[in-house]
Amino acid sequence: MFHYLNPKRLYFAVGKKRFWEFVILAAFLLFFYGPILNLVMLAFGNVYDVPGIIPQEFGFRWWKFIFSQKNLVSSIALSFIFAVVTTVVSMVFCIPAGYAIARFKFPGRRFFMLSFLLTNAFPKIGLYTSIGILYYRYNLMGTFIGVVIIHMINTMMFMVWLPAGAFGNVHRQQEEAARDVGAGPFRTFLTVTFPMAMPGIAVGAIYTFLGSMEEMQGTYLVGIPQYRTMPVEMYSVIAEYPVMAGAVFAITLMIPTIFFLVLMRKYIGPSAIAGGFKLK
């Protein structure tokens, strides 16, 4: 005997399910985007007094203030310089390492790969303290190269793991086909291997650039007072000026992140990221 569903009950059940899906989605959006919206609101607030929910006056007062301070503007330029140099140097050293890991089977390969995770496996302040002792010994405190090394330590995991996974996904038959028509090893790498691995390399470069842009603790310990980057200055801005100035500086720090994510959006995805973390 067949039982037919009541259309009204079915409509009610579907509507109830969609209602709770909407509630969950709304809660997620509020949790995720609420702080960002509040940050943007504060950045354009000329006057804000607690416990007000929104600023009492809107405008560009604190934007003008931030960009009129020479030390703050110079810290923005300095952060870009460190990020570019760190990314380029990391690519020079880490791409060959990633290729070797992907192409050669050697004893301790897995341990070598996992060793890059150690810098992110425990609080970094302890690591920076140990590095500081070495820096004093080799006169690297307060030097440009010393800050670059600190930035590289925090980003080497991405610049080794992701390119290694990308190189590992390039089929050897394609490289052998190029060799069969007369291409040498170096030309084969430049014309076949490197372009096919470019998505993984690009993702690693993006993470390296953004990681360098936001690095603060290590830069503060080894770079002060000679090198004050955006994250370092941001802490002093938050401590010394109203919250609106800190919001402006935070948004300024976020702009490069948004720009590069949009620019390289075709390389950023679950498959590209997961592919770089495969240990075969």
Image: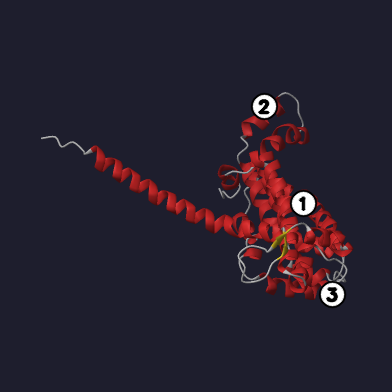
Q: Earlier in the sequence, mark 3 or mark 2?
A: 3
Q: Earlier in the sequence, mark 1 or mark 2?
A: 1
Q: Specify the label residue 87 is tagged with.
A: 1
* Residue 29 visible in the current orientation: yes
* Residue 99 visible in the current orientation: no
Quarter-of-image position of residue 241: bottom right
How far apart marks 3 and 2 lie (CA) works out to 51 Å
Identified at 34% across, 44% down, the residue is 15
Q: Specify the label residue 137 is tagged with.
A: 3
Q: Position of residue 236 (x, y in %)?
A: 78, 71
Q: Position of residue 6 (x, y in %)?
A: 21, 39
Identity, as a three-letter code, of the amino acid under mark 1: Thr
- Left of 156 or right of it: where is 71? right
Identity, as a three-letter code, of the amino acid under mark 3: Arg
- Left of 7 or right of it: where is 153? right
Identified at 65% across, 30% down, the residue is 174
* Mark 2, residue position: 177
Q: Position of residue 101 (x, y in %)?
A: 65, 49
